[in-house]
């Protein structure tokens, strides 16, 4: 490794060689493994280490015969050796023996054991272990301000994309490690402007963590993460972030089964803070209201006019959104046109507006990027519901089963599958396909509870 290179430079070079060998562009590879092309570019540049899931996906897409995994293990071994050398160099420097230092040392020892255990097997070293050790080295150096807010913002955005496209709960370890690191930076008495940026980062990271915990059916832990995100957003003074955090919390709460009235109160709080100022968070709040009210209307507990009115409010905000919000098609932080069409499709389907629902579904399918596997599966469920309401039960049940046989079932998809089942005519509920749909849904819930 030459001076200035990272241990991951060799991995990046090998990745580029295999991509060129297979004749695959960055964007095509991104579509295949469902990671953003800019993230893959940073892997090739040796700037960021890929996760274990990413390496597995790359191996599958490029068929390298295990070469990428071998290079990754070597990079991790080099990283550990570099850290060992750094720690030896710093052994002469002493820090005050405080209880906190003792706790930090214990965390670093546990992280080191994780690294050594992984290096002795074919497993990939947990990124959180490397990050914990790096944090200890930085603390020993005293280089507490060697970070960039721009990089943290990009990290939060990437998490916002990966939670929309990756396996359920896969980000929990990485995000938690980053939260610990940002907390350490906050403890270092940063300047006022840096503190504000770090608070924004903490809010974003906890928002992602809360969503991942919701996916894993851990509502209590998700509420704690949401509470931290809300406090950090409020402390940052960023109005749009405060709105976005509250809207996200309401969506997750509804998917977790919280009472609709409580969810609507959370959304009203977001609307109050926004004060009409257009933002992606405000659009998400109106979309959430339409979603909840349409679900209530389908269950006979609400007037469908209220759901359609919420949809009109959403359209008004969408027309006034800045380009930074509508052009972000991949992450939870934007509100692109595909999100608007999805909201229209769901609202119109559940309120019985067949023609409008079909039109919105068709538009949404055209606009949805293939990386957003969870959203596409949800869209198929909306289509299934529309078909069933249009008396095409066999095809509707087929669409619903296709949705459940794709990516792991999120709480939102579980809820929407329930709407499909409840929308079946009485005679159709005993059909083998309907029974299979219920059994698949129940098996998914049981498997998550066992995790």
Image (tube, rainbow, N blue to C red):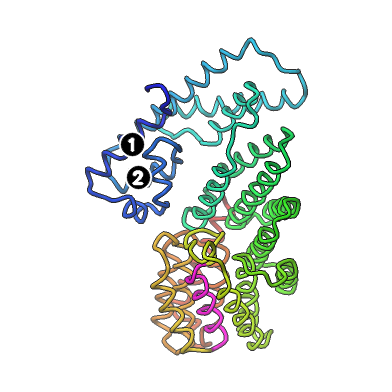
Q: List the single residue furthest toward the right.
A: 98
- Of residues 75 and 410, the one nearer the viewer is 75
The spot of residue 355 in percent (x, y) is: 46, 89
Q: Residue at the location (71% across, 54% down)?
A: 233
* Magenta range: 336-352
Secondary structure mostly seen in the magenta stretch: helix
For the residues labelled 1 and 2, the Cα–Cα distance comes to 8 Å
Residue bearing the label numbered 1? 68
Dot 1 alpha-carbon crowd within 10 angstroms: few under 14, some 14 to 19, many 20 or more: many
Helix, strand or loop status at disc 1: helix
Q: Which mark is residue 144?
A: none
Residue 348 lies within the magenta run: yes
**Image vertical order of residue 196 relative to residue 367, above or below:** above
Find out whether the residues at labels 1 and 2 contact each other: C-beta distance under 8 Å: yes
- Of residues 307 and 254, the one nearer the viewer is 307
Q: Residue at the location (65% across, 86% down)?
A: 300
Q: Residue at the location (45% across, 71% down)?
A: 436
Quarter of the view holding residue 71: top left
The spot of residue 126 in percent (x, y) is: 51, 35
Give the side of residue 208 with respect to residue 47, left or right.
Answer: right
Give the side of residue 27 with respect to residue 296, left or right.
Answer: left
Residue 16 lies within the magenta run: no
- Of residues 165 and 28, the one nearer the viewer is 28
Quarter the N terminus occupies: top left
- Of residues 109 and 426, the one nearer the viewer is 109
Residue bearing the label numbered 2? 58
* Residue 75 visible from this viewpoint: yes
């Amino acid at each position: 490794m030459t001076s200035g290179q990272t241990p991951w430079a060799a991995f990046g070079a090998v990745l580029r060689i295999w991509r060129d060998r297979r004749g695959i562009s960055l964007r095509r590879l991104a579509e295949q493994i469902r990671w953003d092309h800019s993230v893959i570019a940073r892997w090739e540049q040796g700037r960021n280490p890929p996760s274990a899931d990413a390496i597995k996906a790359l191996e599958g897409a490029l068929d390298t015969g295990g070469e990428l995994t071998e290079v990754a293990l070597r990079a991790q071994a080099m990283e550990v050796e570099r850290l060992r050398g750094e720690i030896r160099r710093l052994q002469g420097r002493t820090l005050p023996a405080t209880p906190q230092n003792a706790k930090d040392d214990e965390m670093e020892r546990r992280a080191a054991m994780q690294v050594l255990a992984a290096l002795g097997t074919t497993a990939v070293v947990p990124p959180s272990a490397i990050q914990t050790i790096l944090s200890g080295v930085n603390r020993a150096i005293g280089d507490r301000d060697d970070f960039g807010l721009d990089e943290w913002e990009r990290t939060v955005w990437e998490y916002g994309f990966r939670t929309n496209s990756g396996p359920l709960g896969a980000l929990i370890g990485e995000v938690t490690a980053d939260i610990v690191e940002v907390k350490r930076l906050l403890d270092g008495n940063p300047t006022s402007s840096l503190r504000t940026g770090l608070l924004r980062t903490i809010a974003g990271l906890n928002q992602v963590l809360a969503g991942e915990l919701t996916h894993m059916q851990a509502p209590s832990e998700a509420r704690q993460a949401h509470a931290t995100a809300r406090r950090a957003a409020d402390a940052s003074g960023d109005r749009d972030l405060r709105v976005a955090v509250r809207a996200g919390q309401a969506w997750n709460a509804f998917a977790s089964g919280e009472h609709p009235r409580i969810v609507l109160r959370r959304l009203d709080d977001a609307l109050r803070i926004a004060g009409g100022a257009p933002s992606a968070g405000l659009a998400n709040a109106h979309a959430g209201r339409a979603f909840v009210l349409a679900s209530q209307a389908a269950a006979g507990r609400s007037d469908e006019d209220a759901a359609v009115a919420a949809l009109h409010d959403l359209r008004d905000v969408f027309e006034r959104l800045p380009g930074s919000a509508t052009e972000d098609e991949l992450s939870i932080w934007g509100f692109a046109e595909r999100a608007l069409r999805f909201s229209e499709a769901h609202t119109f389907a559940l309120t019985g507006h067949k023609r409008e629902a079909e039109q919105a579904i068709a538009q949404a399918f055209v606009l949805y990027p293939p990386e957003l596997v969870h959203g596409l599966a949800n869209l198929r469920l909306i289509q299934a519901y529309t078909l069933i309401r249009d008396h095409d039960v066999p095809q509707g049940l087929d669409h619903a089963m296709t949705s459940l046989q794709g990516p792991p079932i999120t709480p939102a998809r579980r809820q929407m599958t329930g709407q499909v089942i409840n929308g079946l005519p009485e005679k159709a509920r005993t059909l083998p396909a309907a029974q299979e749909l219920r059994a698949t849904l129940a098996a998914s819930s049981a498997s998550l509870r066992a995790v």
